[in-house]
Image (cartoon, coloured by chain):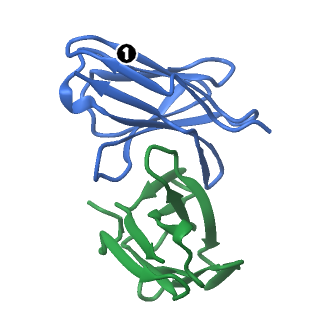
Chain colours: A green, B blue
Amino acid sequence: DQQVKQNSPSLSVQEGRISILNCDYTNSMFDYFLWYKKYPAEGPTFLISISSIKDKNEDGRFTVFLNKSAKHLSLHIVPSQPGDSAVYFCAAFQFSYDKVIFGPGTSLSVIP
Amino acid sequence: KAGVTQTPRYLIKTRGQQVTLSCSPISGHRSVSWYQQTPGQGLQFLFEYFSETQRNKGNFPGRFSGRQFSNSRSEMNVSTLELGDSALYLCASRENEKLFFGSGTQLSVL
């Protein structure tokens, strides 16, 4: 039972354009949603998060949008840079279960 | 604060051997989780420890085990290694909803 889904395994974007990574979830009780970035052979690093009571959070070039009615969130990267090429994992957290659940990841390639 | 430290960084073993991986969490963090990542795969959850007790467990065979010490440091053990155990093993310490990952241990089983 996959509670957090990332239906696009990969995405290619031109440098300078917008990258949009999508994530869907099934459990409406999640309290937080997080995005992690991972380079090969390294551990994931925390990028940005959003509380379930918000619909938008912004940090520099990164913005996360949350649509609770659609159980959907997206990460926007503007402008995209070659250094953004990595695997992005969407994750969800529920306080009552005290557990983080990851999606399968989306591999982003930013083409110079 | 120092980050999550995993040792060793690289490890080569042969089939049938056993291996122990070590993880030191961020100071003050009591929760430590372990994940496996194989090529092209996502993050497969192994287990989570909190205050020396296993709190959650993923869907891995009993050859995979772990423990946590009173200082929150954690070890993960894999016995009777198989070729398919070759992977990047990641440890993370957690504070509320945020996980902080180490650099991982790259295990190769020959």
Residue drawn at x 37%, y 78% is A12
Can you name the residue that lies furthest to the right here?
Answer: B1
Residue A81 occupies which quadrant of the picture? bottom right
Residue at the top extreme, as displayed: B17
The kind of residue on which mark 1 rests is Val
Residue in the foreground of this view, choosing between A41 and B42: A41
Relative height, residue A102 to residue A68 (above, below):
above
Element at label 1: strand
Query: Could one spot residue B101 in this view of the protein?
Result: yes
Residue found farthest to the front = A112
Q: Mark 1: few, some, or many residues within 10 Å (few <14, many ≥20)? A: some
Q: How many marks?
A: 1
Q: Quadrant of the N terminus of chain B?
A: top right
Q: Residue at x 62, y 68 (%)?
A: A49
Image location of residue A43, percent across then percent down: 52, 45
Note whether residue A72 is visible.
no
Most foreground residue, A82 or A78: A82
Q: Which chain is indicated by disc 1? A: B
- Above or below — where is A103 with respect to B43? below
Closest to the observer: A110 or B98? A110
Relative image position of residue B35 (x, y in whole percent): 42, 40
- Identify which residue is drawn at 69% across, 38% down: B3
State the image coordinates of residue B101 (x, y, percent, origin top left): 57, 43
Q: Quadrant of the C terminus of chain B?
A: top left
User: Relative to residue A60, is residue A23 drawn left or right?
Assistant: left
Left or right: residue B23 compared with residue B80 = right
* Point 24% across, 28% down: residue: B61
Read off the residue under disc 1.
B19
Q: Position of residue B38 (x, y in %)?
A: 30, 43
